[in-house]
Image: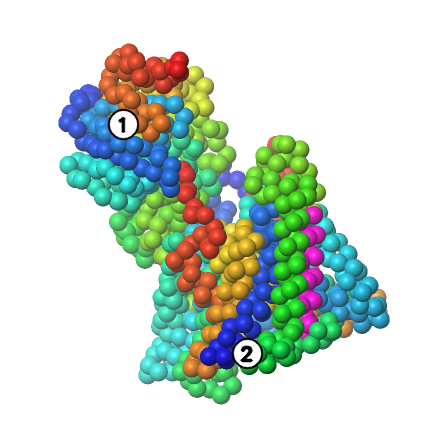
Amino acid sequence: MFYREAGQFKTSYQADAAIFPIRQDRVAIAAVLVIAYAVIPLAATPYIFSALLIPCLILALAALGLNILTGYAGQLSLGHAAFMAIGAFASYNFMLRVPGMPILLAFVCGGLCAAGIGILFGLPSLRIRGFYLAVATLAAQFFIVWCLAKVGWFSNYSSSGVITAQAIVILGYTFDTPTAKYLLVLTIVAVMALAAKNMARSNIGRQWMAVRDMDVAAEVIGIRLVYAKLLAFAVSSFYAGVAGALYAYAYLGTVEPEAYNLDLSFRILFMIIIGGVGTVLGSFLGSAFIVLLPIMLNFTMQFMEQTLHLSIPMSAASNLELMVFGGLIIFFLIVEPHGLARLWQIAKEKLRLWPFPH
Amino acid sequence: MTFFFEVLIGGLLSGVMYSLVALGFVLIYKASGVFNFAQGAMVFFAALTFVGLNELGIPFWLCVPATLAAMILLGLATEKFVLRPLVNQPQITLFMATIGLSFFIEGLAQLMWGANVRGLDLGIQDEPIQWISDATTMNVSKFDITAAGIAAVLVTVLAVFFSRTRIGRALRAVADDHQAALAVGIPLQQIWGIVWAVAGAVALVAGMLWGARNGVQFALTFVALKALPVLILGGFESIPGAIVGGLIIGASEKLAEVFLGPYVGGGIEGWFPYVLALLFLLVRPEGLFGEKIIRRI
Amino acid sequence: MSAPKTESVRKIGDTILKLENISLAFGGVKALTDISFDVREHEIRAIIGPNGAGKSSMLNVINGVYHPQQGTITFHGDVRHNMRPHDAASQGIARTFQNIALFKSMSVLDNIMTGRTLKMKANFIEQALWIGRARREEFAQRAKVEQVIDFLEIQHIRKTPVGRLPYGLQKRVELARALAAEPTLLLLDEPMAGMNVEEKQDMCRFILDVNEQYGTTIVLIEHDMGVVMDISDRVVVLDYGKKIGDGTPAEVRGNKAVIDAYLGVAH
């Protein structure tokens, strides 16, 4: 009974189209933001920032990008990490080669480069669909990462291929502590998530979903498939590109092609499956889940070792992790194919009545 | 010129092994519409199980049926625990489930048998066949020829299985229309179980050949991934397509690596098949053997 | 959708759509052979014929989903060659489908809003930032869509995902989406298939209302002869991809070839 919209009447289309039409949701999101900006920076340890919160937010951004492409526009991609790599390398080169380049602008330019390449690899989507397209996106994954590793110019002819990312300096302030990096990442992610929400509720979001649900009907209603699909690729790759740049600058501290391998692409894909395809919230839930899972498994195994006096070798632990990972994905698909975001929605439905039965 | 043909033949023969992996995909896709991403993991699992059993001191001739049994078991378990609960879900969900499955199988295989790289000796030497070298001055590997022979036998057996047996007929009916097959009393789940078991057996053959050639290691799963561009070329539902696609991919990637690679720093084998498949799709979206799709609304 | 006018704007005018010698084949299969007919402004034109006669193909030719191998289509005086469906949409042609082609996972409101796509001019940056034109348009178009929702009496299901609605309502939502585009030519592919009598009566009323109040020209495929004879001004009869009759309902009813096609003929 505490979570219900009774008594909240919408008197304008504006109120009806709001991102959070129900008051309780607005309160909740405000609380989350307050915690994220005020409580966490005071409470969390550097370990939590750099091992948990920062990767979680960055990967959520990447997942959000993939969700725009796959969840909203219905075009499956198996190579999204490659667009992250482009974002990282492009940002690095803008910083390196353009004197006085502000780093935020470099991130944006990195995103734009990723968007351009994304459009290029999105071209086949105009002719092919479904799994054929999915396999085609693998070409992006392997080709782009190979290209970045082979062409020396991209890495400024570094002999090892691993380059140290430049320091993040904005208006004279150096973001070098985990807390500062966290706050920067949080702000960028929050702004881009808001933009994603806006796109989802406006005309372009509806066009994407229409293309996803039935492309022939979408075209008949006047939607230009070329525009809608390529824009989805561009926006999605832009998100991935910015996420990739943040991944290099705020998380790894290095720029290297190998960080953006097929494995990362799959992890991002799993985030949106487990979190919820076609929801912004799902990208965050999925990311949290996938980042937390190995840490949780580690804890569990340490706990088992201590209580049961078992010794689990390192290799076995990583293999068990693979198995649990795979098993959980199957489990999730069977139990709730719409992901954690749907579970959250169901919980909210229940909350409307709780604690009363009817 | 001799060198060119040597590379070409070497490529074609290794392409045969891509075809073998692709064959497993096609079987499952035809029968159940599932795009089985875990086929590569199954190949890896088969090779590792085989080597693992062999290392335990079990003789070679016993390892084959034992691994076959393990693969069939794995196939049946997949059908029962993964696909059956997901029946009637959209194709994309099933596909995601098979990605999860591939993680699970890879973890399981390495947990059981360890992750270190091992050799697999089938008793066939990877050396040039003498009389061909003498006659044409080309080096053609004995191993590759044997692998191609085995693949040919396997394809023939499968073709006979599908066209001559009752199960094969039922299978084709299922492939054509699930609902209709169910309506005439074909036990759908039994058929799916059989298909997964057969795909497991095909994975065993592919795994043994790949393992003997490249060593049994995790990288095998990446090799198996190359079956995907093969499928794009050949079409997801065509067995001849899988064979021809495999040959094209095998030959072209070797030719590209040898003749183009030196100019761009090498290592292009890793992406060439995908880019080739991508370009191919732009010209012929329905694959080599697929029919032109007329979409009715 | 502009506000309904009180007096009828229905006065059959000049020819707005003219099809001449249309032939369409898929591979070796001939779907349409040498078909010519015209549609006049404000009229309700029915296409009838047995299953497989090529009726849906005819509509697909009109709005550019299929491209005929031969023949010309003249719409509003322009001769068209190979246009894409969205070009047809931007020229004011909207349609519904035989097997409902709604966006299943989207709400009724969002489905109908897609019908307004062509009226929206904001670029996607404005949409991402929810500023300026994007914001204004969203609410202006919403108001238009609400008029359609009122017109078709589907207020109560506004926020329901389309996939959860019963068949009859889905058909109505599809009509709403087409109407939201404010078409000058509306193509309806079996709008009453699979409906019970009450639903059919409702649908008939809506079709006549659209035609009366907005003056929309309608081309309609329907199997229910009673409906066709009641509401249409002129009827084209197709059989095996050929035109076998054309005229007012009364004329068509008396046409020997039509009777043979429907009742069978002794050979």
Query: Residue B296 location, x and y as percent?
Result: 41, 39
Figure quadrant of residue C172: top left
Residue appearing at x 42%, y 20% in the figure: C199
Which chain is disc 2 placed on? B
Residue appearing at x 64%, y 64% in the figure: B149
Q: Main secondary structure of the magenta part?
A: helix
Query: Is residue A117 rendered to the left or right of residue C134?
Result: right
Compared with residue A39, is residue C266 higher up or lower down, i.e. above or below? above
Asked whether A251 or B176 is in front, the reply is B176
Asked whether A269 or C242 is in front, the reply is C242
- In the picture, the quarter occupied by the C terminus of chain A is top right
Q: Does residue C121 belong to the magenta stretch?
A: no
* Disc number for residue C218: 1
Query: Is residue B164 rendered to the left or right of residue B281?
Result: right
Three-letter amino acid code at disc 1? Ile
Tag 1 secondary structure: strand
Q: Is residue C210 visible?
A: no
Figure quadrant of residue C142: top left
Three-letter amino acid code at disc 2? Thr
Tag 2 secondary structure: helix
Q: Does residue B209 belong to the magenta stretch?
A: yes
Q: Is residue A86 visible?
A: yes
Compared with residue A160, is residue C79 higher up or lower down, i.e. above or below? above
Q: Are marks 2 and 1 on the same chain?
A: no
Query: Residue B83 location, x and y as percent?
Result: 65, 47
Residue appearing at x 43%, y 40% in the figure: C103
* The residue stretch that appears in magenta: B194-218
Q: Would you name the residue on which mark 2 appears? A: B136
